[in-house]
């Protein structure tokens, strides 16, 4: 199987296979709304976060509505199971009131910033996984039964890019908590974290990176403002390593105008040049409308309009970015068709020679000297 397998139909295919002992199922909002869960009860359930995405669709008007849908995952946890919740997100933390089984939290906050419920939980011997992102070492600590154990160091996990990708530190905490609560021994959890990266083969569309001759390309399925905000935080940390940052940015047409504007505004605050594209499926909007709203959002962030180019086709937008990118540039693509973008970028980068000069720049130089 390949593709979007986060719905109940895909889950049922996995659960129907008699040779499978453990199934790890991503459970998307859309599938829950459409058909519910593929199972009655689970041993471990986790909700990593709730943000303002998909609002205005399928009867979900507010973040609170969305939280109520996502909460179904942990409400389905069996009596002897575990609910894993992000203590840093007010919506996921509130799910502790209705979650099934026992509770385990994860947090990236320093201990003196923990909410009271988390301090009490750990003091009483409850399970939690924590990593202070502001600390120098970024140790990932596991609390259980009054004991504190070192699970890993964030920088040792390839997926965190040396601890720079804070969102993947959070994901690592959630994964470690789920595995440990499922009965996986801590050394096994530690080894798994130390070998998990962000390659296209391991995690397509999640911080996939290509590097050649100083050019770095990031392909990521950051399809909403919250995702771009997290990715933008990483880009800010990487800027010192790069001459210029080029963003190839798009968002689905069924998002609210305010979400598209925010995506543009965030882009304008992060990148030096923007190439605005649209998804292959416009989802009810006329061609060019999404890109125009994105550009307006960037303008509101005081981004210079002369550094914005609209190229509606994702394939052509990626072509354009790679045609103008120089050595030591960073190109970030928020991809719709992740597989095609990855193949396209990989193919083009392999053909680049050291000292590559974009054709446009060559033509401008020739014009000045003629």
Image (spheres, rainbow, N blue to C red):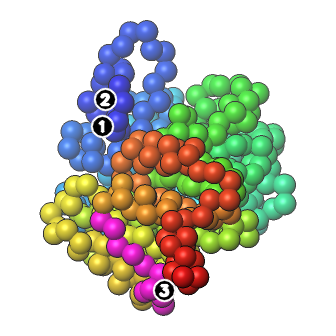
Location of residue 309 with respect to 250 vertically, above or below: below
Name the spot of residue 156 as percent of width and height, x first: 77, 43
Between circles 3 and 2, the one closer to the viewer is 3
Location of residue 325 with respect to 144 vertically, above or below: below
- Residue at point 42%, 33% (across, down): 25
Tag 1 near tag 2, CB within 8 Å:
yes
Location of residue 66 with respect to 34 vertically, above or below: below
The residue labelled by disc 3 is 303
Name the spot of residue 38 as percent of width and height, x first: 30, 31
- Residue at point 23%, 74% (across, down): 289
Q: Is residue 143 left or right of residue 290?
A: right
Residues drawn in magenta: 302-312
Quarter occupied by the C terminus: bottom right
Quarter occupied by the N terminus: top left
Image disc number at residue 10 = 2
Name the spot of residue 97 as percent of width and height, x first: 46, 52
Disc 3 to disc 2, C-alpha distance: 43 Å
Q: Is residue 22 left or right of residue 37?
A: right
Lower sequence index among marks 3 and 1: 1
Tag 3 near tag 2, CB within 8 Å:
no
Task: Find numbered disc 1 in the image and state the secondary structure of the residue it sits on.
Answer: loop
Task: Find numbered disc 3 in the image and state the secondary structure of the residue it sits on.
Answer: loop
- Asked where in the image residue 244 lies, by quadrant, the reply is bottom right
Quick check: can you spot residue 163? yes
């Amino acid at each position: 199987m390949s593709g979007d397998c986060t719905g109940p139909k895909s889950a049922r295919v996995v659960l129907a296979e008699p040779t499978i002992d453990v199934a790890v199922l991503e459970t998307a909002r859309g599938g829950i709304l459409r058909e519910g869960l593929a199972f009655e009860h689970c041993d471990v359930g986790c909700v990593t976060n709730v943000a303002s995405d998909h609002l205005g669709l399928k009867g979900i008007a507010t973040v609170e509505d969305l939280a109520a849908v996502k909460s179904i995952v942990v409400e389905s946890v069996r009596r002897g199971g575990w609910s894993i919740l992000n203590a840093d997100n007010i919506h996921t933390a509130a799910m502790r009131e209705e979650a099934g089984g026992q509770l385990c939290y994860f947090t990236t906050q320093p201990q003196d910033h923990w909410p009271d419920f988390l301090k009490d939980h750990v003091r009483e011997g409850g399970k939690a996984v924590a990593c202070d992102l502001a600390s120098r070492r970024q140790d990932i600590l596991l609390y259980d039964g009054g004991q504190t154990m070192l699970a890993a160091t964030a920088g040792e996990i390839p997926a965190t890019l040396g601890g720079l990708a804070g969102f993947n530190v959070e994901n690592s905490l959630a994964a470690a908590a789920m595995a440990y609560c499922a009965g996986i021994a801590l050394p096994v959890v530690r080894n798994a974290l130390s070998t998990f990266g962000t390659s296209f083969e391991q995690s397509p569309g999640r911080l996939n990176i290509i590097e050649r001759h100083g050019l770095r390309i990031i392909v990521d399925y950051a399809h909403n403002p919250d995702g771009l905000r997290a990715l933008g935080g990483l880009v800010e940390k990487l800027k010192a390593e790069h001459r210029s940052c080029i963003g190839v940015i798009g968002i689905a047409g069924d998002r609210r105008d305010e979400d598209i504007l925010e995506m543009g505004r965030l882009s304008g605050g992060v990148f030096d040049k923007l190439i605005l594209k649209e998804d292959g499926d416009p989802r009810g909007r006329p061609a060019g409308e999404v890109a125009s709203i994105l550009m307006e959002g960037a303008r509101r962030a005081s981004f210079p309009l002369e550094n914005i180019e609209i190229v509606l086709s994702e394939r052509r937008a990626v072509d354009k970015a790679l045609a103008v990118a120089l050595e030591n540039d960073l190109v970030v693509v928020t991809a719709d068709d992740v597989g095609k973008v990855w193949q396209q970028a990989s193919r083009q980068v392999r053909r680049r020679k050291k000292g590559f000069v974009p054709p446009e720049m060559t033509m401008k130089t020739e014009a000045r000297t003629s």
